[in-house]
Amino acid sequence: MKVSFAAPALPRSGALVLTVAKGGALDGLAAEADAAASGALSQAMAASRFDGEAKATIEVMAPFGLDAERVLVVGVGEELDARLAEDVGGTVYSALARSGSSSATLVWPQTGSAAAAGLGAALAAYRFDKYRTTLKDKDKPALAELVVAAPDAEEARRSYEQDGARIVEAVAFARDFVSEPGNVLYPESYADGLRELEALGVSVEVFDQAALEDLKMATLLGVAQGSAREARVVVMRWQGGEEPPIALVGKGVTFDTGGISIKPSGGMEEMKWDMGGSAAVAGAMKAIAGRKAAANVVGIVGLVENMPSATAQRPGDVVTSYSGQTVEVINTDAEGRLVLADLLAYVIERYEPHAVVDLATLTGAMVMALAHEYAGMFSNNDALAESLMSAGAAVDEKLWRFPLHDAYDKMLESHIADMKNIGPREAGAISAAQFLKRFVGDTPWAHLDIAGTAWTDKARPTVPKGATGYGVRLLDRLVRDVCES
């Protein structure tokens, strides 16, 4: 959907969208439109007890006296800030997407947040329909253009084009990867898809199976050894500064059966999105490069498929990680931490980053703890943790910090190796983080368990059902705050 900006005016065609603050009073162009329609809008508001509550809507069809095909009235609550503006924009898109109107004009009431409204609408417009061949026309979105009519239209346009449009593209980039089925997206094809970033000036280096064997990334390769699809590791570098980089690390299990410790069949089709952490890193690199960020950023993703077969890793196997530490594999479905272990040790040794953030759909325990509202965060550095919390709050990708402690670390003790890859049933997300902590040394590090936030079955104003792209905006904002301020 195209988003543009113009000076405030009532449209001559398409849909008209008017905003109303808490209390339900029409003013400005909204009052002018109501007068032209002989009070039809205010009458509809009164009849439906509409009082301007944030994101509430009512629709009036083809009111006499106006050129608009329909009028949508949307509440903006008591205090309209940029975060709410995004949700209002997304609400407007969802309300009109299948209405039959191909264009809409959103009359925006204030300066400073019009670009955010456009951003929210564009994020809400995402669809993944490439495999749907029998959709009826009435089920396809008709809304192709949204004009945000605002007092600061030119400033809003510049802001949207410089930042907002880049975010929309980056989030869609990540959502597309997560949405692809496992027979289409596998390590080799995924790595090929990431080469698209080279057009933006990102250096993309792909390590194939032989290279990974030479590097002795045995914990990562152990996960992949049951699959006919060979593993890949992709390093993406954006060199926008000279300081030591920040490193972004993503788990990319393109399909996770659990391996020999196979998962129950119910819901296993969802395991195509077990690469959501890697998609967040890829999307963040697209956003960062797209806006030519003045920062030095390294993104690294480990791409594997976890399958059961005659060659698959067995429970009880011992593998030697890139760091030299040995791991007894108790459960082959605790595979994401094995992938991340080698990536973390490698990126720290090779690039000496000033901070590392990893993202992974790592544990079902995190979903049990936080459901689908927050991602869990673990960190060995308070300053980094606070920066992540602040960035997440700013873009509505919320985080909740969990503890790290030696008592949890003891859960990973092995009788025959340096550690086990999984602890007891309790505190599963914490012991997983403790496992990863063994591979980062003193480098400031944070682990984000996004198991509950990478995919959603319940749409939100700016996030349709399906792949969320969670982490893209969070990481982009972190880089902006920490590396560019």
Image (tube, rainbow, N blue to C red):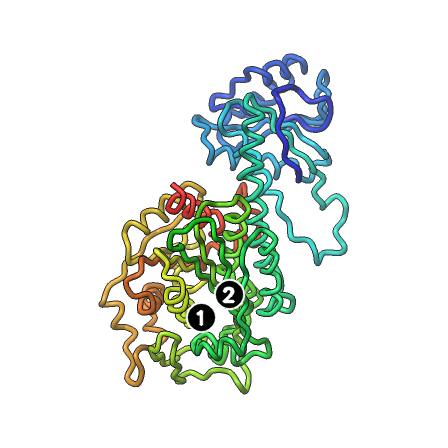
Mark seen at residue 108: none
At horizontal 49% and vertical 57% (from top left) the residue drawn is: 237
Residue underneath mark 2: 252
Name the residue carrying label 1: 339
Point out residue 365 in the picture as x, y percentages from the top left corner: 39, 63
Q: Are marks 1 and 2 in contact (CB under 8 Å)?
A: yes
**Of label 1 and label 2, which has the lower sequence position?**
2
Amino acid on which the number 1 mark rests in the picture: Val
Instruction: Please indicate whether residue 314 sits to the left or right of residue 101 in the image.
Output: left
Residue 131, given in percent of the width and then of the height, sits at 70, 58
Q: For the residue carrying disc 2, how many other residues have a C-alpha within 10 Å: few (<14), some (14-19), or many (20+)?
A: many
The residue drawn where x is 33% and y is 65% is: 440
Q: Is residue 7 visible?
A: yes
Name the foreground residue: 195 vs 190: 195
Q: Secondary structure at mark 2?
A: strand
Vertical position of residue 415 compared to residue 8: above or below: below
